[in-house]
Image (tube, rainbow, N blue to C red):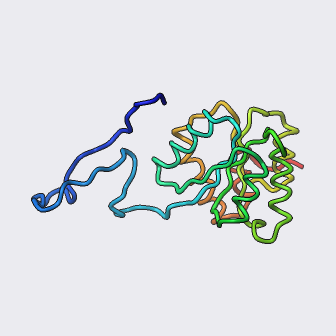
Amino acid sequence: MGVGAALPAFLGEDDPGKPPERQRPPKLLLVGSDETGRGKAKSLSVLVVEDDPAMRLLIVFNLTVSGFRVAEAATGEEGLRAARGESFDLVLLDVMLPDLGGFQVADRLRADESTRSVPVVFISARTSKADLARGRAVGAIDYVTKPFDPVRLATRLREDMDELERGGPASVWELRFGPNDG
């Protein structure tokens, strides 16, 4: 998104079907958001750890527009500090980072009592079976491969969290990659 680009917005009635109140201006909402609270699912907090600024912007923008509360980090060390400093529902973690690799970051998250239970979803251009197996071995619930549909990412993460609640980490992995054969 370039400089001066506009966010999609809707200028409309506060309560469709009722005459608008003249004392208050109409609400301005981002398209795809539901700030009214009607039918809104719990807003998930996500820490995005991605070193590529353009990719990070794309992810953060799409998750934010989809109702997520998003924090970001550009390195593994920044991600670890952020994860220890604030409570997140999920960590979206790039595998290839400039300082610590994503697998190493995930190991450290699992070793720390304060971050041990936070679900990790890897995001990476590394797509070999060995990489996926390593991701699962360090406790990831999902592994999103680049390129991916950034608009669909929010839905996928919500599905992951719903499945995690229903059946646990192995259930999410099976949903995405099929039954574990080994």
Q: Residue furthest front?
A: 3
Q: Quarter-wise, where is residue 124 in the image?
A: top right
Q: Quarter-wise, where is residue 7 in the image?
A: top left
Q: Quarter-wise, where is residue 44 in the image?
A: bottom right
Q: Position of residue 64 (x, y in %)?
A: 49, 49
Residue drawn at point x = 25 percent, y = 54 percent? 27
Left/right of residue 100 with respect to residue 158 in the rendered view: right
Residue drawn at point x = 72 percent, y = 54 percent? 120
Which residue is at the front of the view, 178 or 162? Answer: 162
Left/right of residue 61 with respect to residue 54 in the rendered view: left
Left/right of residue 51 with respect to residue 132 in the rendered view: left
Left/right of residue 153 with respect to residue 21 in the rendered view: right
Q: Position of residue 107 (x, y in %)?
A: 86, 56
**Vertical order, 27 against 126 (above or below):** below
Q: Residue furthest bottom?
A: 113
Residue drawn at point x = 36 percent, y = 58 percent? 35
| Figure label count | 0
Which residue is at the front of the view, 31 or 148? Answer: 31
Q: Residue furthest top?
A: 2
Q: Position of residue 29 (x, y in %)?
A: 32, 50
**Vertical order, 154 against 113 (above or below):** above
**Vertical order, 58 against 18 (above or below):** above
Q: Position of residue 162 (x, y in %)?
A: 59, 60
Residue drawn at point x = 81 percent, y = 56 percent? 139
